[in-house]
Image: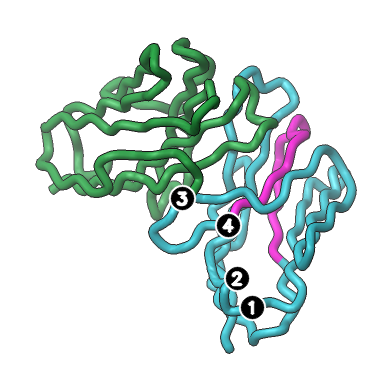
Chain colours: A green, B cyan
Amino acid sequence: DSGVTQTPKHLITATGQRVTLRCSPRSGDLSVYWYQQSLDQGLQFLIQYYNGEERAKGNILERFSAQQFPDLHSELNLSSLELGDSALYFCASSVSGTGVHEQYFGPGTRLTVT
Amino acid sequence: QKEVEQDPGPLSVPEGAIVSLNCTYSNSAFQYFMWYRQYSRKGPELLMYTYSSGNKEDGRFTAQVDKSSKYISLFIRDSQPSDSATYLCAMIPIYNQGGKLIFGQGTELSVKP
């Protein structure tokens, strides 16, 4: 158990809908990272927050947004969902804002868009 | 062309074999190199982390980085069925302001008893 929690574990929704994925980092970690894992693209970095502020951005779609709250938990919002958004979404956390410290991954949320 | 290339396998070996997993990369700015292990339906967990070129050993695992060839390897000695998982290499460039990891596709390893 990495100490990073993600909810829900599974999510099945229809195209065009909006969902929110939630992540709680390990105690003491200030950075939260979101990654998307699909069969064809592998594990792709989406976005990073450090102590409430956006620190780095990957190829995150405009339909996707995230935020980190004062209690350091983070939410990833996915809207206007398409079939291609079906994937595993991982949250990771680290103590610092630079990834040279170990990133601890959560168990993931499996999103299925039908 | 992807920044990090990794043979997806699958790779099947008998118990006790030495396993060699490899990644190549194109960005010469990569300075931090990691290997993650991912069991089915679980999140990745960090196995090894190296900075720049050289070798690092941790128990049955050895990580090697050859920056001149842009090539990294993970060796597993005396492989066990419990090593069956997907192994992902990951890298961070030296100019990185955050913690963005660039991952390879992952190699699926199966160790047969």
- Give yes or no for residue B62 being in the magenta stretch: no
Instruction: Specify the quadrant of the image occupied by residue B7.
Output: bottom right
Q: Mark 4 lies on which chain?
A: B
Q: Mark 1 points at which residue?
A: B80
The mark that comes first in sequence, 3 or 1, is 3
The mark that comes first in sequence, 4 or 2, is 4
How far separated are the C-alphas under marks 4 and 2?
9 Å
Which residue in the rendered view is the most extreme toward the front?
A27
Q: What residue type is labelled 2?
A: Asp
Is residue B50 found left or right of A39 in the rendered image? right
* Circle on res. A97: none
Q: Position of residue A61 (x, y in %)?
A: 34, 26
Q: Do the residues labelled 3 and 2 touch (CB within 8 Å)?
A: no
Q: Name the residue under label 3.
A: B43
Q: Mark 4 points at which residue?
A: B37
Q: What residue type is labelled 3?
A: Gly
Image height of A18 relative to B86, above or below: above
**Over which residues does the magenta segment extend?**
B21-37
Q: Mark 2 points at which residue?
A: B83
Q: Do the residues labelled 3 and 4 touch (CB within 8 Å)?
A: no
Q: Position of residue A16 (x, y in %)?
A: 11, 32
> Residues at marks 2 and 1, common chain?
yes
